[in-house]
Image: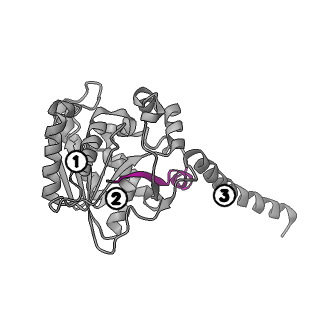
Amino acid sequence: MTKKLKLVLWIGIITSVVIPFSLVLIGRSVLHNSDIPQHKLLFESAEPKTILAFFPHPDDEVTVAGTLMKMVDQGHDVILLCLTRGEAADTGGEISSERLAEIRSLEMQHSAKTIGASHLELLNNPDSGLEKLGVDSLKKLASGIIDQFKPDVLVSYDSKVGLYGHPDHQLTGLILENLFLERVGESSFSPKKLFQITLSPKQINLALKISKGFQENYPKDQSKGLPKPDFSISTQPYFKRILQVIKGHESQAKTLKDLLPYHDKIPPFIYSRIFDREYFHEVKP
């Protein structure tokens, strides 16, 4: 082998292997805090459990899609629930609210199938108007839903921010947290765990720099921000299916760009290893 050929081969190795892995390490250092532990699963259980992912809108499940896919693969039963059909989303007046509700319902059905959920429950409460129903009415509604499906585990938004400040998100997280803390331990109340979606401190800092939604809605007082994660779940093996879920919500393409920024510009091998985990805070009695 000539010296020139050896040089070409070494350049090829550096370009195809060393540089991509270096970019992954740099990206992870920017996004993830090393003091937050990684768990293999949302919870450990020798027996199959039922997980109820409880959200206000179609597309909210994107935030935990990888974790839900992983739990389905582990033999657990996942139920997806949306309080609304998302008819109030901004389309620039191009689509009526009635038609948008139909479109987003179909998009949500595609998502449920991709995730592997056993059931999708789409309710018809007013999008961006949940607060008009009142906390007590919403808690009663949520309590009835939980009694109907009898989940072992609940997953939803946090009660402080609702991930990035949407009132429906925050209110949904609040009513579930209050309901869980009030009823956990009752013989008729099946959930034993409640997990809230959150972000790492480094993710929050980056989102405040590049995400318009975070810049407009996230609390200026950091003490009122998202709860610190207790752990993260590795979701890298599910990246392709997560993208299928995101792309399936075609009507919300602009909004969802904030969740995985630049995913269409960075090679999947690199991107999937940087945005490779989902963060959770566990609510404990």
Nearer-the-camera pick, 141 or 184: 184
Comparing 233 with 93, the one in front is 233
Highlighted magenta segment, given as a residue range: 267-284
Q: Quadrant of residue 75?
A: bottom left
Crowding near the residue tagged with mark 3, few <14, some 14–19, many ≥20 C-alpha atoms within 10 Å: few
Q: Amino acid at mark 1?
A: Leu
Against 166, is 54 above or below?
Answer: below
Which residue position is annotated with label 3? Answer: 16
267 vs 229, left or right, is right
Using a 10 Å C-alpha cutoff, classify the residue at mark 2 as few (fewer than 14 neighbours), some (14 to 19) or many (20 or more): many
1 or 3: mark nearer the eye = 1
Q: Which residue does the image show at 70% across and 55% down from the upper left?
A: 15
**Residue position marked by numbered label 1 in the rendering:** 179
Give the x, y percent position of residue 127: 21, 34
Mark 3 and mark 2: Cα distance apart in space: 32 Å
**Residue 58 percent across, percent down from the top left:** 26, 44
Which residue was labeled with disc 2? 68
Q: Which amino acid, by three-letter code, is at mark 3?
A: Ser
**Compared to 147, does 210 lie above or below?**
above
Please tell me which residue is depicted at 33% across the width and 45% down the height of the picture.
Answer: 157
CA separation in Å, label 1 and label 3: 52 Å
Q: Can you tell which mark lies on residue 39?
A: none
Q: Amino acid at mark 2?
A: Leu
Dot 2: what SS?
A: helix
- Along the horizontal axis of the image, is 6 left or right of 201? right
Within the magenta stretch, is there residue 278?
Answer: yes
Question: Does the magenta segment cover residue 128?
Answer: no
Assess whether mark 3 and mark 1 are in contact (beta carbons under 8 angstroms): no
Callout 1 environment at 10 Å: few (<14), some (14 to 19), or many (20+)?
A: some
In this view, 47 is above or below 207:
below
